[in-house]
Amino acid sequence: MLRFIYTQAGVQLNYLEHQSLEQWMAEQVRFKVRIGESFQSECIWASFPLPRSSRYLWEFRQLSTSALGRSILFGQCDRQAVEVSLRGIWLESCHRTSEGTFLAELPQTVEHLWLQIWQEAQQKKFTLV
């Protein structure tokens, strides 16, 4: 599962290899109930620009399209980036800030390729969000 954490400082990507979306959400609900904190969750689409120059992009697109069908969409962003939209879950506190967590569960091979593209972009200082 891919976990994108949005803060004022930017977006951080975590790869949660041995945890399903359902397990993670159940743990979050238990935790929030224990500490008495409110939160909201909703199914949404999130879009990310990924660099066209990535050596993994073609393979990522092929695997994603065949494995995910309508759960992932590709669009044109600009000359440097491709826009990739994922279906997932948005989780935020009820304070209505721009901070929160977006979770997407994809086939493991697709998640690994996304992580490689993300890391490659970070090294090249490509602005991802």
Image (cartoon, rainbow, N blue to C red):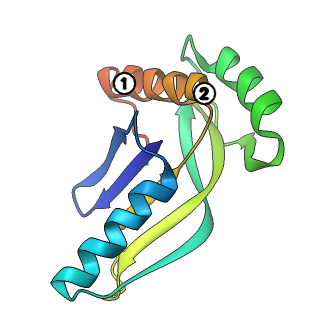
Is 29 positioned to the left or the right of 87 in the image?
Answer: left
* Looking at the image, residue 10 lies above or below residue 49: below
Residue at figure coordinates x 73%, y 23% from the top left: 63
Q: Is residue 99 visible?
A: no
* Looking at the image, residue 87 lies above or below residue 91: above
Is 36 positioned to the left or the right of 76 in the image?
Answer: left
Residue at figure coordinates x 45%, y 42% from the top left: 2
User: Residue 92's image quarter?
Assistant: bottom left
Q: Nearer the viewer, residue 57 or 86?
A: 86
Residue at figure coordinates x 24%, y 86% from the top left: 37
Q: Nearer the viewer, residue 61 or 25?
A: 25
Q: State the image coordinates of residue 49 (x, y, percent, origin top left).
A: 55, 41
Is 43 positioned to the left or the right of 40 in the image?
Answer: right
Q: Nearer the viewer, residue 15 or 74?
A: 15
Disc 2 is placed on an element classified as helix
Identify which amino acid the numbered label 1 is placed on.
Gln
Q: Nearer the viewer, residue 59 or 20?
A: 20
Classify mark 2: residues with Cα within 10 Å, few (<14), some (14-19) or many (20+).
many
Numbered circle sitting on residue 119: 1
Q: Which residue is labeled 2 in the image?
A: 110
Q: State the image coordinates of residue 14 (x, y, percent, origin top left).
A: 33, 40
Disc 1 is placed on an element classified as helix
User: Residue 96's image quarter?
Assistant: bottom left
Q: State the image coordinates of residue 127 (x, y, percent, origin top left).
A: 39, 39
